[in-house]
Amino acid sequence: MKPQMLTILGATGTIGVSTLQVVGLHPQRYQIYALTAHHNIDRLADQCAAFSPCVAVVGSAAQVDPLNQALRTRRVHPVPEILWGPEALAQVACADPVTTVMAGIVGAAGLMPTLAAASAGKKLLLANKEALVMSGALMMDAVRRSGAQLLPVDSEHNAVFQCWPQGHGQAAGVEKILLTASGGPFLEMPLEALARVTPEQACRHPKWRMGKKISVDSATMMNKGLELIEACWLFDLSPERVEILIHPQSLVHSLVAYQDGSLLAQLGHTDMRVPISHALAWPERHTSGVPLLDLTTTGPLTFLPLDRHRFPSVDLAEQAIRAGGSAPAVLNAANEVAVAAFLEGRLGFRDIPYIIAATLEQDHFGDVADLDSLIDVDVRARVSAAHQIESRGR
Ligand SMILES: NC(=O)c1ccc[n+]([C@@H]2O[C@H](COP(=O)([O-])OP(=O)(O)OC[C@H]3O[C@@H](n4cnc5c(N)ncnc54)[C@H](OP(=O)(O)O)[C@@H]3O)[C@@H](O)[C@H]2O)c1
C-alpha cells in the first residue's frame, strides 16, 4: 500500500506530538511532508531529527536561523526546506504530494491552512475545532466541492463518527447525539470560589493532558459549546439534537441515540492517540499504542445533566449556532481574546462568559459570505472583546 504523505499543522502541540507517536508505530504507512511550529523551535528540531520531513514551518522569519542552528546541532540530514509564516502553513496544507493533513493548530490561527486543505481535497483530520466553528458553511462547502474527507479527531466527535450509521453523512434512524463532558476541574467547586480561580488551577484538567487554551475552555465548558457547534456542522444536526451529558470518568467518549431506543457508545482510555489513530487509518484500523480499557477495573461510570447556571458558556454557544451568520465566529473570537486575557491575569475566570455575551450583544459584525468577510468579522469581534475587557478592568 502507498504510504500516506502527511502534513501536521501544529506538530509541536499536544495533538501534534500524539500524532507523531502514532505515526512512529507505523513507519511503512506514513511519510512526513511537513511539520509546523509557532514558537517551539527545539521540539520542532527534535521532530525533524526523528521524522525527516521535506518541509519545516516556523512562525516568523526570525526563527529560521535558530531552527537551522538547532538542526545542525542535532546533525539532521537531509535538512528540510524551512518556510515561515501563515502563507507557508496554507502552502504545506495543500501541496500536491500531501494526501493527509492533521489540523492541530489551536484557535483561529488554524483557519487558513485547514480551509486550504479542505479546498484541495485532502484527507483532513480535524482537531482544530475553532476553524470549523468560525467558518461552518464555508468549510463544509469547500469539503463538498473538493471531495475532501473530513474526519473528526476531537474525541467526542470521533466517538459519534464511530457510532454513526454506515460512516459519515447518513443520519438514518438517528434521534440525537449525546456529547459527554468531564465537567473539568471545577465541576464541584462552590460557585463563589470560581471567581478566584487561577490560570494554573484552570489548566489542571482532571482527565486530559492538553494545551492551555483548550484546558481553560474545558474549565469554562466553552469547549463543550464549541463542540456542540462543531457537531451540528459535522453531522448536519440542529442544536436541539445535540445533548450534553456530564460524565466525570471520561471513559464513554460520546453516544448516538437511535429512534428504536438503542444507544451506541464508544469507550476507551482518555488518550488522544485513540481518535488520532482511528482518523489516520480510516477506513481501516491499526494500533495506537493505547491498551484496551479493562472494564473490570474502571469503577462506576456516572452521568449527570449539565448545570447551565454553573456553565453559562454552553448557552452562549447554543445561542450563537441558532443565530447563525457571523455569531459563531464572533463567539469564537471573543472567547479566544477572553481566555488569553485570563491566562495573562488580566481577567477573572467568571468574567470570560460575561465578555463573550457582551461581545455577541454588539451585533454589528456583518455577514460571512466569503473568507474575506469572515476574517473581517473575526478582527472586529476581537477589537470589541478587547474593549469589553478594558472597560471591565476600569
Ligand atoms: N489536546 C487535546 O487533547 C485536544 C483534544 C481535542 C481537540 N483539540 C484541539 O486541537 C487543537 C490543538 O490543541 P492542543 O491541545 O494540541 O494545543 P497546544 O498544545 O497549545 O498546541 C498548539 C499548536 O499550535 C501551534 N500554534 C499556536 N499558535 C499558532 C499560530 N499563531 N500559528 C501557527 N501555529 C500556532 C503551536 O506551536 P508552538 O507550540 O510551536 O508555539 C502548537 O504546535 C485545538 O484546536 C484544540 O481545541 C485538542
Image (cartoon, rainbow, N blue to C red):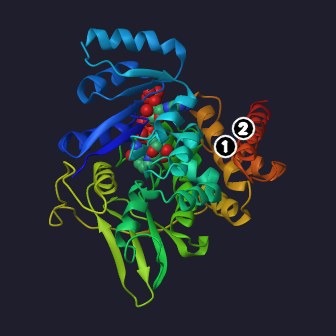
Give SS at disc 1.
helix
Give SS at disc 2.
helix
Q: Circle 2 sits on which residue?
A: 382
What residue is at 22 percent from the left and 46 percent from the top? 29
For badge 2, the amino acid type reads: Arg
**Residue 238 image position (x, y, % from top left):** 60, 73
Report, in whole angstroms, how far the alpha carbon at label 2 lies from the one at label 1. 6 Å
Q: Circle 1 sits on which residue?
A: 333
**Residue 190 image position (x, y, % from top left):** 52, 51
Q: Which mark is residue 209?
A: none
**Number of residues whose C-alpha sits closer than 10 Å to that of mark 2, classed few (under 14), some (14–19) or many (20 or more):** many
> Quarter-wise, where is residue 327 in the image?
bottom right
What residue is at 32 percent from the left and 18 percent from the top? 79
What residue is at 46 percent from the left and 14 percent from the top? 64
- Above or below: residue 274 compared with residue 318: above
The quadrant the C terminus occupies is top right
**Residue 106 image position (x, y, % from top left):** 50, 39
For badge 1, the amino acid type reads: Ala
**Number of residues whose C-alpha sits closer than 10 Å to that of mark 1, classed few (under 14), some (14–19) or many (20 or more):** many
